[in-house]
Amino acid sequence: MGIGEGLEKDGTSLSQIPTYVTAVPNGTEKGLYMAVDLGGTNFRVCSIQLNGDTTFNLTFSKVAIPKELMVAKTAQELFAFLAKQIELFLQTHHEEHFEKHVRRRLTQSASDGFKDEHVFRLGFTFSFPVQQIGINKGNLIRWTKGFDIPDAIGKDVCALLQDEIDKLHLPVKVAALVNDTVGTLMARSYSSPGKTGAVLGAIFGTGTNGAYVEKLANVKKPLSGEYDKSTGEMVINTEWGSFDNQLNVLPNTTWDIALDKQSVNPGIQMYEKRVSGMFLGEILRLVIIDLLKNKDVSFFRDDNSSSNDWKSTTNIAPASGIYAQWGLDTSIMSVAAADNTPELSTLRQSLESDLHVYSPAIDDAQAFKAISAAIVRRSARLSAVAIAAIVLQTGKLTDPESAGEPIDIGVDGSLVEHYPYFRDMIYEALRIVDGIGEEGAKRIRIGIAKDGSGVGAALIALVAAGMEKSKSTADVLGELRSASHAEHLKTVPEKTGDN
Ligand code: BGC
């Protein structure tokens, strides 16, 4: 899937972005951190207490990103909104610290306002393709998932956020920049440590992507930032959403073509447009529109009340989401899949309440369910292709050193979390992939890494805090793992919660 090519040079459709993260955690890490997550749909602010025993406590707030900010004129408008949410979170959940920090800041005479150790270290999960140039520095390559703010392209997203945080005088330092897949990989390794940790973190949500642990020797393209060579590995953010933008192998239906044409980024994220949650509902909507236009098909339409099992007439309100781009939310596809009642009454109720299709007949609901299932099954099977490619790339299936060990994969995202049997459909497809087969599929352990991006960002903020004292990732994680762990923790500056 172009894995090798992306490791050799920049500008390929599979970006294969080096993350400069060279080790995965093992569950013994400790401390209180903040994390924010700008995904495709929501902005989450959280604080995470890592307990050092593979468990954590997480407090979070979540707000839907206003649609107009996704296409704002300037990056500043979006990032000011994000900083404001951080302020609200601190006021609500960490009032004590917030007050204390603000007071300190006001009384501190140092030019930067206050001492660094009184600052919350924040991990910034930014779920878009970024050319990372350091642990808290990275330039936006392109927007995805319906965002379109050209002003931000090429800019350092950490600096954009830090500027707005500073304008509000918040005691917060953007310490680490993390893609959500990298966060998921880190979180999975923290929560379910095995002998070797997870090999892949993947998101199947609004968007899709994966990050995996690659051998440094295979990373042939030049690496500009600082990194630790001792582990011989580096986490690579594949940005597989743009796999096969050329459409050499991806399926391409008339509805895929229409969706792409009407999107804000035609020609890119072509794999994502067939796989992830943001797009599946839109594909279904486009199919439905075609069926409605087809005079020979009776869909959401009856001749009279006798052809409807509810003895009524089906009609679609003009304001139905069916008639508006992005108007069919993918979540109804989970409802369709989960409804196995003889009359599909739950689905029919959702068709009424969510899509304003009144009195849908049973055969309409059955057709809706069947088409929806086909779209998601294709998505799951394509998801399996990406997972299989990474598993094969790691060589773990044939490596005698990992013989018999599970190949651990952390996943997160609304699709894999909420769509019934999504994971089972992935397994079904994995079993028939060349080089994986029944035996290989049995060794692949796909588990949900819930809140992965928050916990993962906190873990990377922890690493970053250690690096500020000129330590490498491996040093910091290594020290935290060592027996005299508590002693070493004192050398890691971040422990805001203890202040
Ligand atoms: C972005 C990735 C992200 C994925 C999942 C994609 O659209 O390009 O960076 O990891 O969505 O959120």
Image (cartoon, helix red, strand yellow):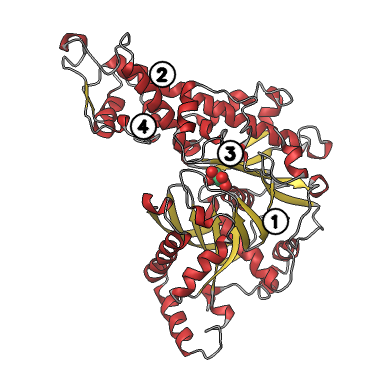
* Classed neighbour count for the residue bearing mark 1: other residues with Cα under 10 Å, few (<14), some (14–19), many (≥20): many
Q: Is mark 3 within 8 Å of ligand 1?
A: yes
Residue with the mark numbered 2? 370
In terms of sequence position, does the residue under pointer 2 or pointer 4 come before the other? 4
Above or below, 73 relative to 243 = below
Q: Position of residue 68 (x, y in %)?
A: 37, 51
In terms of sequence position, does the residue under pointer 3 or pointer 2 come before the other? 3
Q: Position of residue 323 (x, y in %)?
A: 30, 30
Residue with the mark numbered 1? 21
In terms of sequence position, does the residue under pointer 2 or pointer 1 come before the other? 1
Residue with the mark numbered 4? 332
Q: Is mark 2 within 8 Å of ligand 1?
A: no
Q: Is mark 4 within 8 Å of ligand 1?
A: no
Q: Nearer the viewer, residue 198 or 195?
A: 198
Label 2 vs label 1: CA separation?
Answer: 43 Å
Q: Depth-wise, is mark 4 or mark 3 nearer the camera?
A: 3
Instruction: Give the residue drawn at x 44%, y 23%.
Output: 373
Label 4 vs label 3: CA separation?
Answer: 23 Å
Label 1 vs label 4: CA separation?
Answer: 38 Å
In terms of sequence position, does the residue under pointer 4 or pointer 3 come before the other? 3
